[in-house]
Image (cartoon, rainbow, N blue to C red):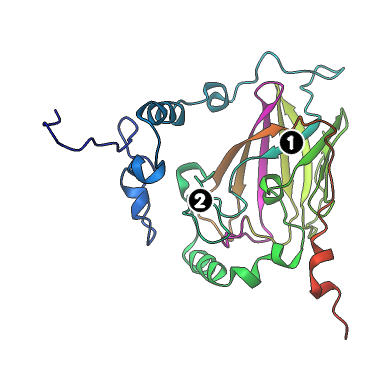
């Protein structure tokens, strides 16, 4: 009980835990303790704080369960219709793990299951080196294709087209394209591709895409998380209603990681009037591509 004249403790903590996941990263103290709401929401009323706290910790049951909603529209062959313009609304493009805000980097809650990436010891040291040199070493900084899964959660929309034999994803970022061939096998020998080779199948109402044949030139984010040419991905696209897709990707790379790991997030359908993919040709703004001898 609060004594007379004692200050009101406005620290918000979810039941059984703190506001943020605990990490061992240097400078992550604010993630180990509850964060006073007075520091996060200056001028908020008690009512608004309570409302914020309630909705911040209410789970989205359908997405967590990975079950498709009954209102999903369907194609002529009875499969969920994923056609439309979508976008991830998170900060994974900057860092797929929990991270604090920095100049030019918004704070964000990670999309990695358990917030841990099981790097081999040499690879953990390489990731740290990548982070320290990220401003110049990040392949995206040189306008290269970002690869998969990174292109799926970059801050640019993408458009899905589908028919029974093929699903095509067009991206606003450098007009990149993904072709997902349904019900077919990967080429018999390894081929180095920026975006990998995508082969799809349906498991109930979930589109499952198997990807191999990557090069080792792309990262997962701007924080230096990386892979080798042995990368193998399995994506799962599950519609959660007419305007949401639950996206999960399992990452496997025996050259870099000690075991497979997962990321998951939600894609949101964009519905603005006259919506269309526009252009973001990053090389048009990069003097490296236009430098004279």
Instruction: From the viewer's perspective, tell me whether residue 97 is left or right of residue 150.
Output: left
Residue 62: x, y in percent?
Answer: 56, 21
Segment colored magenta: 221-246
Secondary structure under badge 2?
Answer: loop
Mark 2–mark 1 distance (CA, rounded to whole Å): 22 Å
State the residue in front, 114 or 59.
59
Instruction: From the viewer's perspective, tell me whether residue 279 is left or right of residue 52.
Output: right
Secondary structure under badge 1?
Answer: strand
Q: Which residue is mark 1?
A: 86
State the residue in front, 107 or 167.
107
In this picture, is 215 found above or below 195? below
Q: Is residue 235 magenta?
A: yes
Residue 95: x, y in percent?
Answer: 56, 54
Instruction: From the viewer's perspective, tell me whether residue 148 is left or right of residue 20.
Output: right
Question: Residue at (46%, 47%) from the top-left corner?
Answer: 115
Question: Residue at (62%, 52%) from the top-left corner?
Answer: 93
Q: Which residue is mark 2?
A: 107
Residue 72 occupies which quadrant of the picture?
A: top right
State the residue in front, 11 or 145.
11
State the residue in front, 131 or 119.
131
Q: Quadrant for the N terminus, please.
A: top left
Instruction: Residue at the far left: name it.
Output: 3
Question: Residue at (60%, 47%) from the top-left corner?
Answer: 251
Residue 216 appears anywhere in the view: no
**Discs 2/1, front:** 2
Q: Earlier in the sequence, mark 2 or mark 1?
A: 1
Residue 36: x, y in percent?
Answer: 32, 43
Residue 166 occupies which quadrant of the picture?
A: top right
Q: Is residue 126 magenta?
A: no
In this picture, is 178 found above or below 143? above
Residue 23: x, y in percent?
Answer: 38, 52
Question: Residue at (29%, 36%) from the top-left corner?
Answer: 10
């Amino acid at each position: 009980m609060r004594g007379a004249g004692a200050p009101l403790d406005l620290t918000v903590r979810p039941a059984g835990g703190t506001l943020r996941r605990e990490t061992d990263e240097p400078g992550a103290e604010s993630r180990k303790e509850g964060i006073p709401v007075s520091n996060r929401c200056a001028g908020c009323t008690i009512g608004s704080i309570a409302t914020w706290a309630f909705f911040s910790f209410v789970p989205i049951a359908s997405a967590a369960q990975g079950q498709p909603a009954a209102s999903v529209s369907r194609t002529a062959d009875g499969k969920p219709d994923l056609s439309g313009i979508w976008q991830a609304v998170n900060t994974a493009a900057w860092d797929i793990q929990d991270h604090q805000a920095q100049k030019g980097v918004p704070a964000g809650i990670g999309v990695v299951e358990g917030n841990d990436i099981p790097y081999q010891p040499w690879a953990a040291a390489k990731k740290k080196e990548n982070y320290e040199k990220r401003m110049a070493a990040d392949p995206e900084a040189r306008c290269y294709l970002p690869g998969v899964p990174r292109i799926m959660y970059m801050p640019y929309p993408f458009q899905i087209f589908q028919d029974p034999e093929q699903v095509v994803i067009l991206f606003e970022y450098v007009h990149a394209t993904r072709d997902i061939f349904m019900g077919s096998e990967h080429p018999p020998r390894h081929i180095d591709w920026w975006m990998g080779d995508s082969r799809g199948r349906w498991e109930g109402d979930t589109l499952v895409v198997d990807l191999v044949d990557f090069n080792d030139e792309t990262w997962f984010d701007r924080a230096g998380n990386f892979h080798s040419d042995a990368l193998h991905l399995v994506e799962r696209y599950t519609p959660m209603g007419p305007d949401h897709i639950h996206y999960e990707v399992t990452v496997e790379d025996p050259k870099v990681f000690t075991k497979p790991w997962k990321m998951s997030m939600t894609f949101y359908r964009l519905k603005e009037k006259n919506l269309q993919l526009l252009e973001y040709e990053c090389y048009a703004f990069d003097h490296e591509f236009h430098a004279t001898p």
